[in-house]
Amino acid sequence: MIAIAGSIAQRPHRPGHAWVFLSYLLGFRQLGHEVLFVDRVDSASQGRWLTETMEGSGLGGAYAALVDGGEETVGLPRRQVAARLARCALLINVNGFLTDAELLAAAPRRAYLDIDPGFAQIWEAQGLADTFAGHDDFITVGTNVGGADSRVPTGGRRWIPTLPPVLLDRWPPVPGGSAFTSVGSWRGPFGPLSHDGREYGLRVHELRRFLELPARVGAPFELALDIDPEDGRDVEALRAASWRLTDPLAKLACFESYQRFVQGSLAEIAIAKGLYVGTRGGWFSDRSATYLASGKPVVAQETGFSKALPTGRGLFAFEDLDGAAEAAEEVRANPREHAAAARAIAEEHLDSRKVLTGLLERLGVE
């Protein structure tokens, strides 16, 4: 059994976030493993979203959420969760989300999966927080963490890099589309950081650098952007620069509408958080993996990921406005060629069967 601890319930009606965890759960099940998902809920609406997501994904009977961190649960009762954890080959604790001491201790082997490379490592280096304690292995989607040019502190740990897995059968290629799109948050749950004399910002700070992109390319650019009403000036600036803005909670709150948005695109324009860009940790988006699998080229801001994935056809890494515009124009000029290359990258490098098999092999888990 492989257990995953994460936070589907914590972000209701955000199917893109849920896919982060479902890709691992369904991917491991596809490989023949029994799976278990452990979450926590703080409200009835969170519990309903988790139940709807898990049951709708065919994972009924394979999940539990601790209610307010206590004995009550949604899904499997706590005693069954502890019993299943005790016989699992591996517990993958995403960003250290599971903190329940009893349940953590029940798992014979605990791996920390870092999906936001740089944040927790810098917090630890500065003595602000330690989410790594109590884990045996350390995995990161920062494919360049530990590399010579990476500024992500390693804390003296051996970090095992992994690319995000994507379920190819759940994300088939779909032809067509006219707009460059993406889905994301303007600021996100974490604030900017300073470390070793460098300032690291968020997506908001990077997006402001690329306001002129739609005008430079002359194509539709649409963001399903989770942005606070207090950022009204930024909304006005984006719209004035011809960025189309969609409210993801209003338009993409179910799995079907989210997938239609991704697969109805021409390509993804992936602008990263400033911390990912500045630390060169090699972060690559799980969302971008679904675009590629869908036959949608990805024009992505460089974070160091180009050392792990081929670029230039189907996937582009840009550093500045000129590079982003040039890549977008190339996609527009040769859409079929880059659509086929995008799917080929997903098949070769991101297929959940290959990614998860390789991860278990590097961990030494049968």
Image (tube, helix red, strand yellow):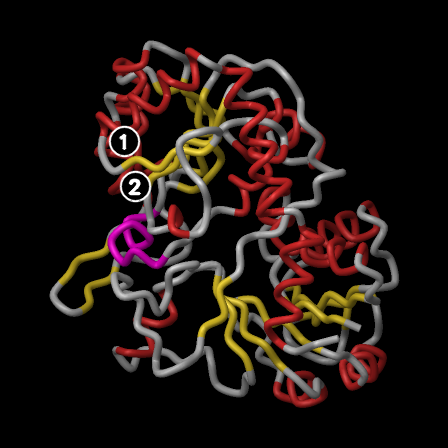
Crowding at label 2, few (<14), some or many (≥20) Cα neighbours within 10 Å? some
Boundaries of the magenta span: 273-281
Left or right of 114 in this view: 44? right
> Residue 275: x percent and y percent?
29, 55
Crowding at label 1, few (<14), some or many (≥20) Cα neighbours within 10 Å? some
Asked if residue 213 is positioned above or below residue 193 in the image, the reply reads above
Label of residue 207 in the image: none
> Residue 38: x percent and y percent?
70, 69
Residue at horizontal 35 percent and vertical 75 percent from the top: 154
Q: Quadrant of residue 15?
A: top right
Q: Earlier in the sequence, mark 1 or mark 2?
A: 2
Residue that label 2 marks: 204
Left or right of 345 in this view: 148? left
Residue at horizontal 54 percent and vertical 29 percent from the top: 341
> Residue 156: x percent and y percent?
35, 83
Marks 1/2 in contact by CB < 8 Å: the verdict is: yes
> SS of the residue at dot 2?
helix
Q: Quadrant of residue 99?
A: bottom right
Asked if residue 347 is positioned above or below residue 257 in the image, the reply reads below
Residue that label 1 marks: 234
Asked if residue 284 is positioned above or below residue 143 in the image, the reply reads above
> SS of the residue at dot 1?
helix
Name the chief secondary structure element in magenta.
helix
Q: Of all residues shown, which one is farthest toward the right?
A: 61
Q: Quadrant of residue 233?
A: top left
The image quadrant where one finds the N terminus is: bottom right
